Image (spheres, helix red, strand yellow):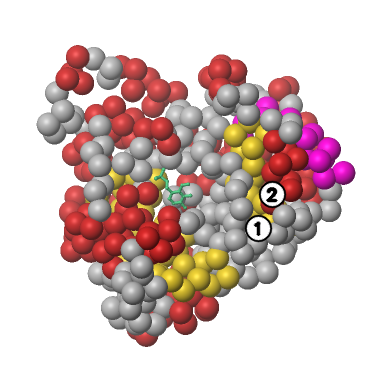
Protein backbone atom coordinates (compact mmCIF):
# COMPACT_ATOMS: atom_id res chain seq x y z
CA UNK A 1 0.00 0.00 0.00
CA UNK A 2 0.97 3.56 -0.67
CA UNK A 3 2.61 5.55 2.11
CA UNK A 4 0.46 8.63 2.48
CA UNK A 5 1.65 12.01 3.65
CA UNK A 6 -0.77 14.23 1.85
CA UNK A 7 -2.29 17.67 2.19
CA UNK A 8 -0.97 20.06 4.76
CA UNK A 9 1.07 17.44 6.59
CA UNK A 10 3.00 16.85 3.41
CA UNK A 11 3.92 20.52 3.24
CA UNK A 12 4.22 21.58 6.86
CA UNK A 13 5.37 18.36 8.54
CA UNK A 14 4.16 16.23 11.42
CA UNK A 15 5.15 18.61 14.20
CA UNK A 16 3.13 21.44 12.70
CA UNK A 17 0.25 19.08 12.06
CA UNK A 18 0.15 18.19 15.73
CA UNK A 19 0.28 21.90 16.53
CA UNK A 20 -2.69 22.56 14.31
CA UNK A 21 -4.68 20.07 16.32
CA UNK A 22 -3.92 21.83 19.58
CA UNK A 23 -6.59 24.10 21.03
CA UNK A 24 -4.43 27.13 20.18
CA UNK A 25 -4.54 26.14 16.52
CA UNK A 26 -8.29 25.61 16.56
CA UNK A 27 -9.34 29.01 15.37
CA UNK A 28 -12.08 28.37 12.83
CA UNK A 29 -15.38 30.25 12.92
CA UNK A 30 -16.99 27.10 14.34
CA UNK A 31 -14.60 26.72 17.23
CA UNK A 32 -17.03 27.68 19.97
CA UNK A 33 -20.02 25.80 18.62
CA UNK A 34 -17.90 22.73 18.01
CA UNK A 35 -16.24 22.62 21.40
CA UNK A 36 -19.49 23.13 23.30
CA UNK A 37 -21.17 20.06 21.89
CA UNK A 38 -17.92 18.10 21.86
CA UNK A 39 -17.84 18.68 25.61
CA UNK A 40 -21.26 17.05 25.78
CA UNK A 41 -20.53 14.13 23.51
CA UNK A 42 -16.88 13.36 23.10
CA UNK A 43 -17.38 9.85 24.40
CA UNK A 44 -20.50 7.68 24.26
CA UNK A 45 -20.96 5.63 27.41
CA UNK A 46 -17.35 6.38 28.36
CA UNK A 47 -16.04 4.88 25.09
CA UNK A 48 -14.58 6.98 22.27
CA UNK A 49 -16.47 5.87 19.16
CA UNK A 50 -14.06 5.58 16.24
CA UNK A 51 -15.94 2.66 14.69
CA UNK A 52 -18.93 3.98 12.74
CA UNK A 53 -17.83 6.78 10.35
CA UNK A 54 -20.41 9.17 11.77
CA UNK A 55 -19.59 12.87 12.00
CA UNK A 56 -17.89 13.73 15.27
CA UNK A 57 -19.19 17.27 14.90
CA UNK A 58 -22.86 16.70 14.15
CA UNK A 59 -24.89 19.16 12.08
CA UNK A 60 -23.72 22.72 11.48
CA UNK A 61 -25.08 25.65 13.50
CA UNK A 62 -27.66 26.65 10.85
CA UNK A 63 -29.04 23.12 10.74
CA UNK A 64 -29.23 22.95 14.52
CA UNK A 65 -31.11 26.26 14.50
CA UNK A 66 -33.52 25.02 11.81
CA UNK A 67 -34.34 21.92 13.86
CA UNK A 68 -34.92 23.92 17.05
CA UNK A 69 -37.11 26.50 15.33
CA UNK A 70 -39.33 23.79 13.81
CA UNK A 71 -40.11 22.06 17.09
CA UNK A 72 -43.67 23.42 17.32
CA UNK A 73 -47.18 22.00 17.60
CA UNK A 74 -47.11 21.75 13.84
CA UNK A 75 -45.32 18.39 14.27
CA UNK A 76 -48.80 17.07 15.09
CA UNK A 77 -49.59 17.27 11.37
CA UNK A 78 -47.81 14.67 9.32
CA UNK A 79 -49.77 13.39 6.33
CA UNK A 80 -47.75 14.37 4.36
CA UNK A 81 -45.13 15.93 6.62
CA UNK A 82 -44.06 19.51 5.85
CA UNK A 83 -40.81 20.05 3.95
CA UNK A 84 -40.50 16.53 2.54
CA UNK A 85 -41.59 17.47 -1.00
CA UNK A 86 -39.55 20.66 -0.62
CA UNK A 87 -36.48 18.53 0.13
CA UNK A 88 -36.99 16.47 -3.03
CA UNK A 89 -37.44 19.71 -5.04
CA UNK A 90 -34.33 21.26 -3.47
CA UNK A 91 -32.22 18.25 -4.43
CA UNK A 92 -33.66 18.03 -7.95
CA UNK A 93 -33.23 21.77 -8.63
CA UNK A 94 -29.71 21.76 -7.35
CA UNK A 95 -28.66 18.88 -9.63
CA UNK A 96 -30.65 20.08 -12.64
CA UNK A 97 -32.95 17.04 -12.72
CA UNK A 98 -36.68 16.61 -12.14
CA UNK A 99 -38.30 15.39 -8.94
CA UNK A 100 -39.12 12.01 -10.54
CA UNK A 101 -35.36 11.42 -10.67
CA UNK A 102 -35.04 11.57 -6.86
CA UNK A 103 -36.32 9.29 -4.13
CA UNK A 104 -35.88 9.76 -0.40
CA UNK A 105 -35.31 7.10 2.22
CA UNK A 106 -34.69 6.96 5.94
CA UNK A 107 -30.93 6.82 5.39
CA UNK A 108 -29.36 5.36 2.27
CA UNK A 109 -29.37 1.87 3.80
CA UNK A 110 -32.95 1.07 2.64
CA UNK A 111 -31.98 2.09 -0.92
CA UNK A 112 -29.10 -0.39 -0.91
CA UNK A 113 -31.37 -3.13 0.46
CA UNK A 114 -34.06 -2.38 -2.11
CA UNK A 115 -31.54 -2.42 -4.94
CA UNK A 116 -30.28 -5.93 -4.19
CA UNK A 117 -33.83 -7.22 -3.72
CA UNK A 118 -34.98 -5.58 -6.95
CA UNK A 119 -32.15 -6.70 -9.21
CA UNK A 120 -30.39 -9.80 -7.83
CA UNK A 121 -31.37 -13.47 -7.82
CA UNK A 122 -29.51 -16.78 -7.67
CA UNK A 123 -28.77 -16.49 -11.37
CA UNK A 124 -28.25 -12.70 -11.41
CA UNK A 125 -25.51 -12.15 -8.85
CA UNK A 126 -24.35 -9.08 -7.00
CA UNK A 127 -20.84 -7.85 -7.84
CA UNK A 128 -19.08 -5.97 -5.04
CA UNK A 129 -15.59 -5.15 -3.86
CA UNK A 130 -13.86 -6.91 -0.99
CA UNK A 131 -13.87 -5.10 1.31
CA UNK A 132 -16.61 -2.54 0.81
CA UNK A 133 -19.69 -1.36 2.71
CA UNK A 134 -21.34 -4.65 3.59
CA UNK A 135 -25.10 -4.04 3.38
CA UNK A 136 -25.50 -5.20 -0.23
CA UNK A 137 -23.46 -8.37 0.39
CA UNK A 138 -25.54 -9.12 3.49
CA UNK A 139 -28.83 -8.76 1.61
CA UNK A 140 -27.57 -10.91 -1.27
CA UNK A 141 -26.77 -13.67 1.24
CA UNK A 142 -30.15 -13.26 2.97
CA UNK A 143 -32.12 -13.69 -0.25
CA UNK A 144 -29.93 -16.43 -1.70
CA UNK A 145 -28.62 -14.29 -4.55
CA UNK A 146 -25.25 -15.03 -6.11
CA UNK A 147 -22.30 -12.95 -4.94
CA UNK A 148 -19.09 -12.15 -6.83
CA UNK A 149 -16.62 -10.41 -4.56
CA UNK A 150 -13.59 -8.78 -6.20
CA UNK A 151 -10.73 -8.05 -3.84
CA UNK A 152 -9.32 -4.50 -3.71
CA UNK A 153 -5.80 -4.02 -5.07
CA UNK A 154 -2.65 -3.68 -2.98
CA UNK A 155 -3.24 0.09 -2.58
CA UNK A 156 -6.72 -0.58 -1.18
CA UNK A 157 -8.37 0.68 -4.39
CA UNK A 158 -11.36 -1.03 -5.93
CA UNK A 159 -10.18 -3.26 -8.78
CA UNK A 160 -12.13 -1.70 -11.64
CA UNK A 161 -11.05 -4.17 -14.30
CA UNK A 162 -11.86 -7.11 -12.05
CA UNK A 163 -15.29 -5.64 -11.23
CA UNK A 164 -16.04 -5.00 -14.92
CA UNK A 165 -15.09 -8.57 -15.84
CA UNK A 166 -17.18 -9.98 -12.98
CA UNK A 167 -20.16 -7.85 -14.06
CA UNK A 168 -20.99 -9.93 -17.12
CA UNK A 169 -24.45 -11.39 -16.52
CA UNK A 170 -24.70 -9.84 -13.03
CA UNK A 171 -27.92 -8.35 -11.66
CA UNK A 172 -26.26 -5.46 -9.84
CA UNK A 173 -22.80 -3.94 -9.45
CA UNK A 174 -22.32 -2.13 -6.14
CA UNK A 175 -19.55 0.46 -6.51
CA UNK A 176 -18.76 2.62 -3.49
CA UNK A 177 -16.90 5.80 -4.48
CA UNK A 178 -15.19 6.85 -2.21
CA UNK A 179 -14.98 3.32 -0.83
CA UNK A 180 -15.76 2.36 2.74
CA UNK A 181 -13.56 1.05 4.45
CA UNK A 182 -10.50 1.86 2.34
CA UNK A 183 -11.35 5.55 1.73
CA UNK A 184 -9.98 5.40 -1.82
CA UNK A 185 -11.59 7.11 -4.82
CA UNK A 186 -11.71 6.71 -8.58
CA UNK A 187 -11.70 9.76 -10.84
CA UNK A 188 -14.63 10.81 -13.01
CA UNK A 189 -12.92 9.53 -16.17
CA UNK A 190 -12.16 6.10 -14.67
CA UNK A 191 -15.73 5.75 -13.38
CA UNK A 192 -17.14 6.78 -16.74
CA UNK A 193 -14.99 4.23 -18.61
CA UNK A 194 -16.03 1.54 -16.08
CA UNK A 195 -19.74 2.28 -16.46
CA UNK A 196 -19.56 2.43 -20.26
CA UNK A 197 -17.67 -0.87 -20.40
CA UNK A 198 -20.14 -2.70 -18.15
CA UNK A 199 -23.13 -1.28 -20.01
CA UNK A 200 -21.61 -2.32 -23.34
CA UNK A 201 -20.59 -5.83 -22.26
CA UNK A 202 -23.54 -6.57 -19.96
CA UNK A 203 -26.42 -4.30 -21.00
CA UNK A 204 -28.92 -5.71 -18.47
CA UNK A 205 -26.73 -5.15 -15.42
CA UNK A 206 -27.77 -2.39 -13.02
CA UNK A 207 -25.07 -0.29 -11.34
CA UNK A 208 -25.41 1.39 -7.94
CA UNK A 209 -22.82 4.11 -7.38
CA UNK A 210 -22.76 4.81 -3.62
CA UNK A 211 -21.52 8.37 -3.04
CA UNK A 212 -22.17 8.51 0.73
CA UNK A 213 -18.74 10.09 1.36
CA UNK A 214 -18.54 12.39 -1.67
CA UNK A 215 -18.61 15.57 0.43
CA UNK A 216 -15.30 14.60 2.02
CA UNK A 217 -13.56 14.24 -1.36
CA UNK A 218 -12.10 17.24 -3.17
CA UNK A 219 -13.54 18.01 -6.63
CA UNK A 220 -10.18 17.41 -8.29
CA UNK A 221 -10.04 13.76 -7.16
CA UNK A 222 -13.57 12.63 -7.97
CA UNK A 223 -16.94 13.82 -9.22
CA UNK A 224 -20.44 12.50 -9.06
CA UNK A 225 -21.51 9.88 -11.60
CA UNK A 226 -24.94 11.56 -11.83
CA UNK A 227 -24.59 12.49 -15.54
CA UNK A 228 -24.12 8.79 -16.31
CA UNK A 229 -27.22 7.93 -14.24
CA UNK A 230 -29.15 10.36 -16.42
CA UNK A 231 -27.70 8.77 -19.54
CA UNK A 232 -28.09 5.08 -18.63
CA UNK A 233 -31.36 3.73 -17.25
CA UNK A 234 -29.35 1.00 -15.47
CA UNK A 235 -27.21 3.38 -13.41
CA UNK A 236 -28.25 5.16 -10.22
CA UNK A 237 -26.57 7.05 -7.38
CA UNK A 238 -27.15 6.90 -3.63
CA UNK A 239 -26.26 9.65 -1.16
CA UNK A 240 -26.49 10.03 2.60
CA UNK A 241 -26.98 12.89 5.06
CA UNK A 242 -25.31 10.71 7.71
CA UNK A 243 -21.70 11.62 6.97
CA UNK A 244 -20.44 15.16 6.20
CA UNK A 245 -23.87 16.65 6.98
CA UNK A 246 -23.64 15.17 10.47
CA UNK A 247 -27.21 13.82 10.53
CA UNK A 248 -26.86 10.04 11.03
CA UNK A 249 -29.42 10.10 13.85
CA UNK A 250 -31.95 11.95 11.68
CA UNK A 251 -31.92 9.21 8.99
CA UNK A 252 -32.07 10.82 5.55
CA UNK A 253 -30.67 9.38 2.33
CA UNK A 254 -31.65 9.64 -1.32
CA UNK A 255 -31.15 8.07 -4.69
CA UNK A 256 -30.95 9.76 -8.08
CA UNK A 257 -31.52 8.08 -11.39
CA UNK A 258 -34.18 7.30 -13.95
CA UNK A 259 -37.74 6.97 -12.73
CA UNK A 260 -38.37 3.33 -13.66
CA UNK A 261 -35.14 2.19 -11.98
CA UNK A 262 -35.89 4.13 -8.79
CA UNK A 263 -39.46 2.77 -8.82
CA UNK A 264 -38.09 -0.78 -8.94
CA UNK A 265 -35.85 -0.07 -5.92
CA UNK A 266 -38.72 1.54 -4.00
CA UNK A 267 -41.05 -1.33 -4.88
CA UNK A 268 -38.66 -3.94 -3.51
CA UNK A 269 -38.17 -2.63 0.03
CA UNK A 270 -39.72 -0.06 2.38
CA UNK A 271 -37.94 3.29 2.27
CA UNK A 272 -39.55 4.58 5.50
CA UNK A 273 -41.06 8.06 5.85
CA UNK A 274 -38.71 11.00 6.22
CA UNK A 275 -40.16 13.20 8.97
CA UNK A 276 -40.57 16.98 8.89
CA UNK A 277 -37.71 17.79 11.28
CA UNK A 278 -35.33 15.59 9.33
CA UNK A 279 -36.52 17.15 6.08
CA UNK A 280 -36.00 20.77 7.20
CA UNK A 281 -32.63 19.77 8.67
CA UNK A 282 -31.61 18.14 5.38
CA UNK A 283 -32.69 21.18 3.30
CA UNK A 284 -30.73 23.50 5.57
CA UNK A 285 -27.65 21.27 5.70
CA UNK A 286 -27.69 20.77 1.93
CA UNK A 287 -27.88 24.51 1.27
CA UNK A 288 -25.22 25.41 3.83
CA UNK A 289 -22.28 25.01 1.44
CA UNK A 290 -20.03 27.07 3.69
CA UNK A 291 -20.47 24.57 6.51
CA UNK A 292 -19.80 21.58 4.25
CA UNK A 293 -16.59 23.24 3.04
CA UNK A 294 -15.58 23.79 6.65
CA UNK A 295 -16.44 20.18 7.59
CA UNK A 296 -14.39 18.84 4.65
CA UNK A 297 -11.40 20.98 5.62
CA UNK A 298 -11.69 20.15 9.31
CA UNK A 299 -11.85 16.42 8.57
CA UNK A 300 -8.96 16.66 6.09
CA UNK A 301 -6.71 18.32 8.65
CA UNK A 302 -7.58 15.81 11.37
CA UNK A 303 -7.12 12.90 8.94
CA UNK A 304 -3.74 14.25 7.79
CA UNK A 305 -2.59 14.45 11.42
CA UNK A 306 -3.63 10.84 12.12
CA UNK A 307 -2.20 9.49 8.84
CA UNK A 308 1.10 11.27 9.53
CA UNK A 309 1.20 9.71 13.00
CA UNK A 310 0.72 6.19 11.56
CA UNK A 311 3.31 6.82 8.86
CA UNK A 312 5.67 8.06 11.57
CA UNK A 313 5.13 4.76 13.44
CA UNK A 314 5.98 2.88 10.22
CA UNK A 315 2.47 1.85 9.13
CA UNK A 316 1.00 2.33 5.66
CA UNK A 317 -2.39 3.96 5.21
CA UNK A 318 -4.58 3.73 2.10
CA UNK A 319 -5.13 7.08 0.38
CA UNK A 320 -8.33 8.20 2.10
CA UNK A 321 -10.78 10.84 0.88
CA UNK A 322 -13.32 10.11 3.61
CA UNK A 323 -13.76 10.50 7.37
CA UNK A 324 -12.06 7.17 8.05
CA UNK A 325 -8.70 5.57 7.32
CA UNK A 326 -7.68 1.98 6.61
CA UNK A 327 -4.35 1.18 8.19
CA UNK A 328 -2.10 -1.78 7.46
CA UNK A 329 -1.16 -2.69 11.03
CA UNK A 330 0.39 -6.01 9.97
CA UNK A 331 -1.68 -7.71 12.68
CA UNK A 332 -5.31 -8.77 13.09
CA UNK A 333 -7.73 -5.88 13.54
CA UNK A 334 -9.12 -7.70 16.58
CA UNK A 335 -5.78 -7.60 18.41
CA UNK A 336 -5.53 -3.83 17.88
CA UNK A 337 -9.22 -3.29 18.63
CA UNK A 338 -9.05 -5.19 21.93
CA UNK A 339 -5.90 -3.30 22.95
CA UNK A 340 -7.53 0.08 22.16
CA UNK A 341 -10.69 -0.88 24.02
CA UNK A 342 -8.60 -1.33 27.18
CA UNK A 343 -8.03 2.42 26.80
CA UNK A 344 -11.74 3.08 26.13
CA UNK A 345 -11.38 3.62 22.38
CA UNK A 346 -13.45 1.55 19.95
CA UNK A 347 -12.05 1.21 16.42
CA UNK A 348 -13.61 -0.46 13.37
CA UNK A 349 -14.87 -4.02 13.04
CA UNK A 350 -13.21 -6.74 10.96
CA UNK A 351 -13.24 -6.19 7.18
CA UNK A 352 -12.62 -9.55 5.52
CA UNK A 353 -10.59 -10.46 3.54
CA UNK A 354 -8.15 -7.93 5.06
CA UNK A 355 -9.09 -8.41 8.73
CA UNK A 356 -5.79 -10.10 9.58
CA UNK A 357 -3.75 -7.08 8.54
CA UNK A 358 -5.89 -3.94 8.33
CA UNK A 359 -8.07 -1.91 10.65
CA UNK A 360 -10.51 0.92 9.83
CA UNK A 361 -10.41 3.93 12.13
CA UNK A 362 -13.10 6.60 11.90
CA UNK A 363 -12.00 10.19 12.41
CA UNK A 364 -13.33 11.80 15.57
CA UNK A 365 -12.98 15.42 16.65
CA UNK A 366 -9.56 17.07 16.99
CA UNK A 367 -9.66 16.53 20.72
CA UNK A 368 -10.58 12.88 20.34
CA UNK A 369 -7.92 12.15 17.73
CA UNK A 370 -5.26 13.83 19.80
CA UNK A 371 -6.04 11.43 22.63
CA UNK A 372 -6.51 8.49 20.27
CA UNK A 373 -3.09 8.92 18.64
CA UNK A 374 -1.45 8.82 22.08
CA UNK A 375 -3.21 5.50 22.70
CA UNK A 376 -2.33 4.14 19.24
CA UNK A 377 1.34 4.92 19.89
CA UNK A 378 1.15 3.09 23.21
CA UNK A 379 -0.57 -0.07 21.96
CA UNK A 380 1.56 -0.31 18.81
CA UNK A 381 4.88 0.37 20.55
C1 LIG B 1 -20.75 3.60 1.99
C2 LIG B 1 -21.98 3.70 2.84
N1 LIG B 1 -23.17 3.67 2.24
C3 LIG B 1 -24.30 3.74 2.93
C4 LIG B 1 -24.27 3.83 4.32
C5 LIG B 1 -25.58 3.87 5.04
O1 LIG B 1 -25.72 5.07 5.71
P1 LIG B 1 -27.14 5.70 6.05
O2 LIG B 1 -28.16 4.60 6.01
O3 LIG B 1 -26.97 6.28 7.41
O4 LIG B 1 -27.37 6.73 4.99
C6 LIG B 1 -23.05 3.85 5.00
C7 LIG B 1 -22.98 3.93 6.47
O5 LIG B 1 -21.97 3.82 7.10
C8 LIG B 1 -21.86 3.78 4.22
O6 LIG B 1 -20.66 3.79 4.80
Please identify the quadrant where the N terminus is shown: bottom right
Q: Is mark 2 within 8 Å of ligand 1?
A: no
Q: Is residue 377 magenta?
A: yes
Please identify the quadrant where the C terminus is shown: top right
Tell me the magenta residue range: 364-381
Please tell me the numbered disc located at residue 355. Answer: 1
- On the question of residue 104 being in view, the answer is no
Q: CA distance from mark 1 to mark 2?
A: 8 Å
329 above or below 225? above
Image coordinates for residue 363, horizontal then vertical, percent: 62, 40
Residue for point 32% across, 53% down: 111
294 above or below 116? above
Residue for point 52% across, 46% down: 216
Q: Is residue 116 magenta?
A: no
Q: Total number of numbered labels?
A: 2
**Could you say which is closer to the camera, residue 267 or residue 139?**
139
Q: Residue furthest bottom?
A: 201
291 above or below 141? above
Q: Main secondary structure of the magenta part?
A: helix
Q: Residue furthest left?
A: 79
Determine which residue is flagged by label 2: 334
Residue for point 53% across, 54% down: 180
Marks 1 and 2: CB-CB under 8 Å?
A: yes
360 above or below 242? below
Amino acid sequence: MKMTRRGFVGTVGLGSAAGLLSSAGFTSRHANAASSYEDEKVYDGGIMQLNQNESARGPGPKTMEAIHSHVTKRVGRGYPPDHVNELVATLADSYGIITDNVILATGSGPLLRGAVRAFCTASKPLVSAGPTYATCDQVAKQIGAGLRNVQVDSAGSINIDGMATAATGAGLVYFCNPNNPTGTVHSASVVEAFIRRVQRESPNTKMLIDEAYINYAADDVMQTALPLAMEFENVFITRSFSKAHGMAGLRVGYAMGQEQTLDAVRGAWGMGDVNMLSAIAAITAFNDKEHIDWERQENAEIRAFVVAAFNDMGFEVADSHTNHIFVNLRRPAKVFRDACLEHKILVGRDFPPLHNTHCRISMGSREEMHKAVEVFRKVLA
